Amino acid sequence: MSQIQLLPAVEKFLSQPGRLFIGGTWQDAAGGRRFAVENPASESSVAEVAEGDERDVDAAVAAARAAFTGPWAQHSPAQRGLLLFRLAELLDQHREELAQLITLENGKPIANARGEAASAANIIRYFAGWPTKIEGSTHPVSPASGAPMLNYTVREPVGVCALIVPWNFPLTMCVWKLGPVLATGCVAVLKPAEQTPLVAIRLVQLIEAAGFPAGVVNLVTGLGAHTGAPLAGHADVDKIAFTGSTQVGRLIAQAATGNMKKVSLELGGKSPNIILPDADIVRAAKGAADGIFYNQGQVCTAGSRLYVHASVLDQVLEELQRHAAAHVLGPGLDPANSMGPLVSARQLGSVRGYLQRGQEEGAELICGGDRPAHLERGHFIQPSVFLDRAERACVAREEIFGPVLTVMSWTEVDELVLRANDSPYGLAAGLWTRDLRSAHRVAAQLKAGSVWINCWNVVDPASPFGGYKQSGWGREMSKNVIDAYTETKSVFVDLA
Ligand code: ADP
């Protein structure tokens, strides 16, 4: 097969430089600078985008504040819901455009990008139902004076939210945060990753077309140090929601203390996936392979540590090699390819470094290990599997963010649970078994925000998502995220 034809709308979009969106106006960066967006499959530039700096961040925050206290506050919950439903319709109508932009800048196979675009509409539709259901409560208080007292709570929007997102799911990460912002009546300054600003720009164009008032959503594209950092430290930002590396998450948390912003963080992981001896081994091995190879392994919830019961180790290793070999690597725009490139040269360098260090530190390379020889250009890496009996190599302990699986074996379940939990991270965990009792017993002991039993990477807007330990603060999606974007006001009324 060959690469799909880009839609005329996508060609046109790419021919114009991407601009900032501040207070309802598309504009160049104050400093006039731009940066190039690379197609990681071809290593060529696909578009140019405005490179914002502190001045643009200031303007965007001011525009957001003006919208928050002005026109947006006049919108009823039902009106906010209607606008979100309209946005979901537009996301559906422009699904293929969004998918092509995702593949162009991120590299993932077009089928996966189409899935991401389709799910974006569903996520926004889920949040469209929320504005009319954000309720307070009444409380049976007992004042010492004995005076009759009414006490009730109301939930109010937090205010100006800085949304800093990564490149691995460039559309999903935006809508996970914009959904609750718009449902609760907050306003946003969105800062996409420098590797993947294009789909964010198209999304904001659709937000504008849906009819949200000027200033409700502002977009500042640019580099982490020059746009993300001033946004994280800005004195008039009320909340920051960040998804990315634990290293940058730490900087964000520190920057937020200046004015005590509310902070939610979705960070890294090194998630344990466990195969019990009674599992459907064929299904478990396929789940384990998908759990690490999906999205080229660039997933915070990647099942990167696989604990296999010693009695089925050989069979699982064989299956894993089969799945790795079945992947067809190549540009994501060719539907025949099931695995695209990593997002950047830097990411490729980092993953190759781990592949080398893993072997030096005693892990046995079962398959993969380097770039595919037949692809000269692009940041491609083979799906790779290590066996690390000692469980001491860096590949068994550190987040790699690439298609690299490290397999360990186990024999005794209590010890296994200790090993699975022995990580600074706690984002996800999974297990494969046919036994209901083992499933729930082990699930109860795993220190992870998501536990998947006989499945992996299932996420749903109705279910909370987030991490224990150094994997983050707070939860995204579900009612939990509505709480995270609202303040609770407790009102006492003396009825005497
Ligand atoms: P990765 O290492 O996977 O590229 P990062 O955590 O560096 O992920 O980036 C996630 C997001 O954080 C991106 O939008 C990036 O521009 C932004 N970012 C990077 N450094 C900073 C910083 N110092 N302050 C605020 N945002 C930053």
Image (cartoon, helix red, strand yellow):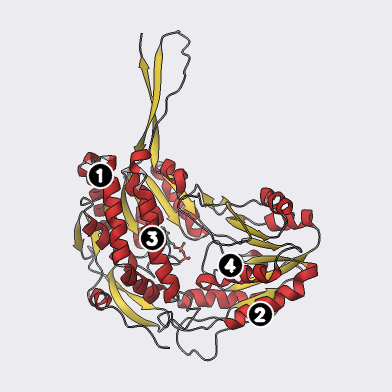
The CA distance from mark 4 to mark 1 is: 40 Å
Residue 132, compared with residue 431, is above or below; it is above
- Local packing at callout 2 (Cα closer than 10 Å; few below 14, some 14-19, many 20+) is some
Report the amino acid beneath label 4.
Gly
The part of the image, by quadrant, that contains residue 79 is top left
- Is residue 233 visible to us here? no
> Dot 2 corresponds to which residue?
321
In this rendered view, identify the residue nearer to me: 425 or 148.
148
Image location (x, y in percent) of residue 333: 40, 80
Image location (x, y in percent) of residue 41: 43, 82
Q: Is residue 458 left or right of residue 213?
A: right
The CA distance from mark 4 to mark 2 is: 14 Å
Report the amino acid beneath label 1.
Gln
User: Along the polypeptide, which appears first: circle 2 or circle 3?
Assistant: 3
Q: Secondary structure at mark 1?
A: helix
> Dot 3 corresponds to which residue?
120
Report the amino acid beneath label 3.
Ala
- Local packing at callout 3 (Cα closer than 10 Å; few below 14, some 14-19, many 20+) is many
Residue 492, compared with residue 238, is above or below; it is above
Q: Which mark is residue 79?
A: 1
User: Along the polypeptide, which appears first: circle 4 or circle 2?
Assistant: 4
Image location (x, y in percent) of residue 490: 40, 26
Indicate the quadrant containing the C terminus: top left, top right, bottom left or bottom right: top left
Report the amino acid beneath label 2.
Gln
Image location (x, y in percent) of residue 444: 67, 48
Between circles 4 and 1, the one closer to the viewer is: 1
Residue 283, compared with residue 3, is above or below; it is above
The answer to whether the beta carbon of the residue marked 1 is less than 8 Å from any atom of ligand 1 is no
User: Along the polypeptide, which appears first: circle 4 or circle 1?
Assistant: 1
User: Along the polypeptide, which appears first: circle 3 or circle 4?
Assistant: 3
The CA distance from mark 2 to mark 3 is: 33 Å
